[in-house]
Image (cartoon, grey):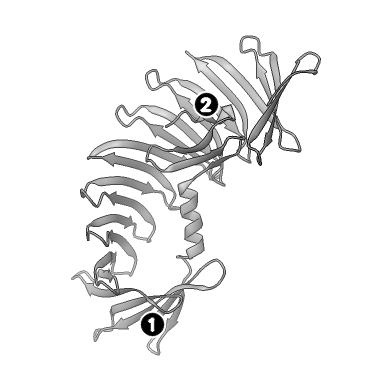
Amino acid sequence: MQCLYELLSTGRYNGSLSDEAGRRAADINGDGVVDILDYQRLYDILRQQIDYDNPVYEYDENGRVIKKSYYDATGRVNRYLVYEYGADGRKSAAVCYNADGSARYNCKVTYRADDWAQWTYYDPETNKALQFDLDDANGVLRQSTEYDPATGKVACVWEYDETGMLCKSTEYNTDTGDVAYMREFDEQERMIDCKGYENGTLSFHWAAVYDENGIETRTYYDAATGKVTCIEVRDANGTLREFSEYNADTGKVSAVLKYDEQGREIDYKKYEDDTMSFHWTAVYDENGAEIRTYYNTATGEKANIEKREYDTENKTCTLTQYDVQTGKKYRVQA
């Protein structure tokens, strides 16, 4: 991972950062405003908007489901499915429609000897297979396979437990057929392990644990050695609260950056051979200006006080330094 604590603490970086998976991980506009992109949080939000968990069912006179509708966060229909039944009374086909009534996909249903249902979804125009789902005898989704519509190759496989909760996903490179990512999820469908691969070799890895309050501790590893490179701590809202970087050779902490509930930097420590070599803390006034205090790491005494005033419109930062003894300013730098 890029050295986030250095880039974020300068207040002068402008652009985007990428994580080890090559995804955009943060946007920094150069005036101290940082947007951290949390993909697990995004997954949760999208899941709520589409409302997979609460469809509305309609039944025929025999008590069979003939229509299932999904609603978005505004209460409007997002999409709906209409089912057909075979002579044995079991589902044999379905068509999914968009809110405007246009066909989204067609589906054929077949059954294994153990009564597990195999659902194959097709593009309504090309008739190419888009997805394959496998339900157990109790009607619980246990596996879902997505295909690349351009190549017809497997793009991703999701695996579910006996209660229908997502527990694992495997993403493939549709050009080579090689595994690209493997992800594992806990009983609340929170991602707890993510591995990325390039040409069959592990290139990216992190693992996460959650406490009873929903606080996530995510540990990143060096793909080649398996040693810890950094640790992130996020609160229940997904806000980054602490970032620790490790020396991959010694395994020791090299820097720790802490954030407040708004994601603003409040404490930064740098270490060399277990000894703190650099330290500052920060508070923010009612106008959003950052007041940063630097310390003498040998004595713990205040060494310098600096006020950072950010102009988001002009993307500038004015630094005002104060004498720690008198409180008088002695230097202003724009």
Question: How far across and how far down the image is residue 309, in percent?
Answer: 70, 32
Task: Tell me, for residue 6, which label it has, or none.
Answer: 2
| Sequence-earlier tag: 2 or 1 | 2
Question: How far across and how far down the image is residue 57, in percent?
Answer: 45, 78
Q: Nearer the viewer, residue 317 or 54?
A: 317
Instruction: Tell me if mark 1 has few (under 14), some (14-19) or many (20+) residues whose alpha carbon lies within 10 angstroms of its own.
Output: some
The C terminus lies in quadrant: top right
Which of pointers 2 and 1 indicates the residue nearer the eye? 2
Residue sitting at the far bottom: 61
The residue that disc 1 covers is 66
Marks 2 and 1, how far apart at CA: 58 Å
Q: Please, what is the three-letter code of the amino acid marked with disc 1? A: Ile
Instruction: Tell me if mark 2 has few (under 14), some (14-19) or many (20+) residues whose alpha carbon lies within 10 angstroms of its own.
Output: few
Above or below: residue 165 compared with residue 279: below
Residue sitting at the far top: 298
Q: How many marks?
A: 2
The N terminus lies in quadrant: top left
Q: Please, what is the three-letter code of the amino acid marked with disc 2? A: Glu
Discs 2, 1 touching: Cβ within 8 Å: no
Q: Quadrant of residue 82?
A: bottom left
188 relative to 330 in the view: left or right: left
44 relative to 97 in the view: left or right: right
Question: How far across and how far down the image is residue 227, in percent?
Answer: 36, 27
Helix, strand or loop for disc 2? helix
Q: Nearer the viewer, residue 150 or 65?
A: 150
Give the residue at x 52% y 29%.
7
Q: Quadrant of residue 24?
A: top left
Give the residue at x 76% y 15%.
323
Q: Quadrant of residue 223?
A: top left
